[in-house]
Every structure is written in C-alpha cells, then in structure tokens.
Amino acid sequence: MAIIQKVVISKFRGFSNAEFEMGNQITVIAGQNGTQKTTLLGLLSQPFSLTNHEKMKDAKPLCGGNYRSSFAEKFKLSTNYDTPNSHEWSLYLHDESEPFVLESIARDRSTGQIRFWKKGDRRQGSGYIHLPVIYLSLKRLVPIGEDTKLQESENVQLTLDEKKLYQELHNEILISLDKIDHADYLESPDKATLGVNTDYYDWMQNSAGQDNAGKIILALLSFKRLKEEYKDYYKGGLLVIDEIDATMYPASQNKLLVVLRKYASRLSIQIVFTTHSLSLLEKACNLQKELSINEATKNQVNVLFLEKIDKNIIINSNTSYETIKNRLNVSLREERNIKLNVFTEDKEAILFTKKLLGTKSNKLKFINITMPCSSLIDLSYRKVPSFSFPESLIIIDGDVRNDNQNKNKIKKQKTFYYYPASNRQKELLPNYYIILVKLMNYGKIYIETIQNNYASQNINMKEFVETDTMQKNGLYNKKVN
C-alpha cells in the first residue's frame, strides 16, 4: 500500500520544483556523495509520528526510540542558509484528496532556528501525519565491540514467535547455516539490537553485518507487533533506512531486498532506503523493470537517481542500471561519438529537427522505425526502458495536444517533445529550438555520454549553448539563457 504516492519539492536546499513518484512497496535512492540523499529521507519521514495518536501514542518500537523521526538525526540546519520560508514540500497521501504541505517557520527568532510544520495550520499536533515511522540512521552502525555501554537488557521482551521469526530472517538474509541457540536483546544509549548466540560464539563476537541485519529485523518485528496489537487502528507505516547496504556483502544485500519487499506487502509498510551498492542497485533496477510489465505490480518498486547539475539536485526516475553504474563510477571516455536515441512518428519530424538544429543534430540518433503516435506514447507510459526518460527522446506532432487521452498520458513525462503544428510553427519554432539545445546542455540527459551513460564530469557544458546557427537563420534574436 502506498502511504505516500507522490512528492513535490517546491524548494529545499538543492531541490527546486522537483517531483517524483514513490514505489508502493520499495523506493531506492542512489546518487554520488553530496546529492542530498539523506536530506530526501528526512523530507519523507519528518511529519510522521504516533505522538498524538489516540490509541497507539504509547507504543515503542523494538529497535529503540519512538515511532517518530527525530529532527536531529536527519538535519544539521544552517542559520545562514536554512531560514524561515526557504523550504516547502508536499506529500500526496493515498487516502487524502489534498496534499500535506510542509514549510519552514521560525522556532526561535533570536537564534534563527527553524522548524518544519504544516503550511497554514499552527494548531498543536497539526504538523504530524499520525502514522508510525522508523528511521534507521547511520548511528545504528556503531560496531558492537566499540560500544562500551552496550549490555543485555530486560527492557524489551520478544515473544517466542518473534524470536523464531528473527532467527529465520537472520539466517535468510545473511545466508547462514548457523544454528542460533538464542538471541539477546542488547541496549545502550546509542543502540538497540539483537545479539546472536550459537554453540560456538556469543553476541560479543557478532559481526557488523549481523548487527545491521538485527536492527532492520527488529524494525520489521515492530511493525508486525503494532499490526497485531492495534489491528483496528493500524494502517501501515514508513520504514526509512540510510545506507542500507553498509556492512553487508552483496549476496546478503540482495536477500535483504527480497525480504523487505515481502514484509512491505504483509505489513502494509512503505520502505525507503539509500544505497551506493552496485549489486543492490542492479537487483532493484531489474526488479523494477520486471514489475513494470504488469499493470498490477508496475509501481511496487521505484529507483531514484540523484544528480547535482550546477547547484541544483535533479531527481531521475526510470534510470537504467548501466546509467547509474557508470555515473557512480564517474567513468571517463575520450571518444565523443555517443548519440542519444530519438523516436519520431514520421520522417517529417526527423527532417524538421535536423534542419532546425543543423550540425547539432549529429548528437542525435534517429531510430529508423515507423510507429504511430499512440504506440510511442503507450510504450513510454508503460515505462518500457528504451522509451523512457532519460534513455531516449520521443518527438511527436504538436497536434497531439488536441487528443485529451494521449495528452493526459504524457502530461508529466519528460520523454516527449512536440514539434510545432503547421498553423503555429512560426510562433513555437524558437522555443522548440531552445528546448532541444538546453536539453543537450543543462538537462538531465548528457548528449555526449548517454549511450554508455558516463558521468557528467566529462561534459563541456558550454559546447551547445551558442545560438549562432539559430540567429544566422533568422529564427530567433536572443541568446539562450
């Protein structure tokens, strides 16, 4: 069940007018360092809390803390740049007709501190969405051996069924054949986890991978307990994990993804995590592609790839694994003959675009197939990778604006560009040119590198910005901004 269906970030640090859909079950966030992945986790989890829930307000998660996302875990706010009214974002929830809009307001005007609250509503408790959230920050990764205050605790007692499920999931995720004798609940000011004891080692010898897996399993067991104890009030929740792959080897990361998807369905929770793991990203991208074929499952998993372009953070959806891999690796390439695939519905669109762009059209590869407009739209609408942004462009006749059904399908897709209908050609020609030139410059597609998807560090961002060709042909009399 999708608790959050869509997110629109009007303004928040590097994000500006960014929009993306959430996976109904799993949302994976990837990107190079400095692309504000943890900030995005904070935006998603910040307003969720059981603090004021009529029935569940006293419930505590087994993994420690409360069913709310601690402000300090996610945000280190700058008094110079994080100022009141400089943040606004909207969460579109599955059972609400209007979005839940949040903004930054002054907490203490004398110090410049801010807080985030529901826009236009200052009533006590109105700033929260009354659903449980568990946020697993990097603090969970403090090794057991380095936490000198960690000790066995009786504060939390697992049921026999919970202990049995923990042992099963532990061995499934870590691909272990160890027979677990028992698991101890461990607690310190910085950690709450389960420690494994076998017939030849105890919890003090647990690996960091076991500790990380134990923390995540405890989070799943927490939602399971909520569902069982408050069955008339439980409506799902949000599990958010920063750098989920840390301390786990690739095969275990992939097993963990399988487990998380299974329990996202069983417990009606939406799971969001960040990762740099290429193995996990390949698994997630393949799963997203596989699920997208079926209408019933196409939105279950969504992989988001974040990139910094100039000072802005761009959120890309439906990015192929090859694109992500090469951009994370910041691969280098001397050859500059890689072209972007372009699909059109007829040869007139090809001729028009080539004539308009001149030599710049050499960076485009026009695919020699004839397909009706409706077929091109349907392939992209179904998120078939080769027909989805940023893998290709689709240029269609501007007359599609008169077809409401197809117009609605492509309304918010970034793959499509219209070439002007005959009666509006003179009016739209300059804008069409600018769109294509800017696309080859500053857009999310890097023309020089799209085919093998090497990193943007290799792009000469000024290469296409000149508009001399357009000006010489009398098409436009202004510089491209």
Image (cartoon, rainbow, N blue to C red):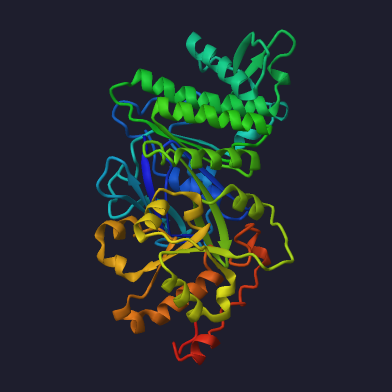
Whether residue 305 is situated above or below residue 208 in the rendered picture: below
Q: Quadrant of residue 211?
A: top right
Q: Estimate the x, y position of residue 306 in percent, counting from the top left.
A: 55, 54
Q: Nearer the viewer, residue 187 or 314?
A: 314
Picture layout, residue 43 above or below residue 134: below
In percent of width and height, residue 293 lies at 43, 41
Q: Is residue 479 above or below residue 50?
A: below
Q: Where is residue 171 in the image (x, y as percent from the top left)?
A: 62, 18
- The reply to whether residue 140 is in sight is yes
Residue at (48, 22) in percent of width and height: 221
Foreground of the two, 189 or 461: 461
Q: Nearer the viewer, residue 148 or 39?
A: 39
- Res 458 quadrant in image: bottom right
Indicate left or right for 197 with 43 as reference. right
Q: Residue at 54% across / 58% down in the picture?
A: 78
Whether residue 188 can be seen here: no
Q: Position of residue 343 (x, y in %)?
A: 47, 62
Q: Nearer the viewer, residue 232 or 357?
A: 357
Query: In the rendered picture of this protein, how many numbered marks are placed on residues?
Result: 0
State whether residue 243 is above or below residue 101. Answer: above
Question: For the N terminus, which image quadrant?
Answer: top left
Residue in the picture at 32% in, 32% down: 53
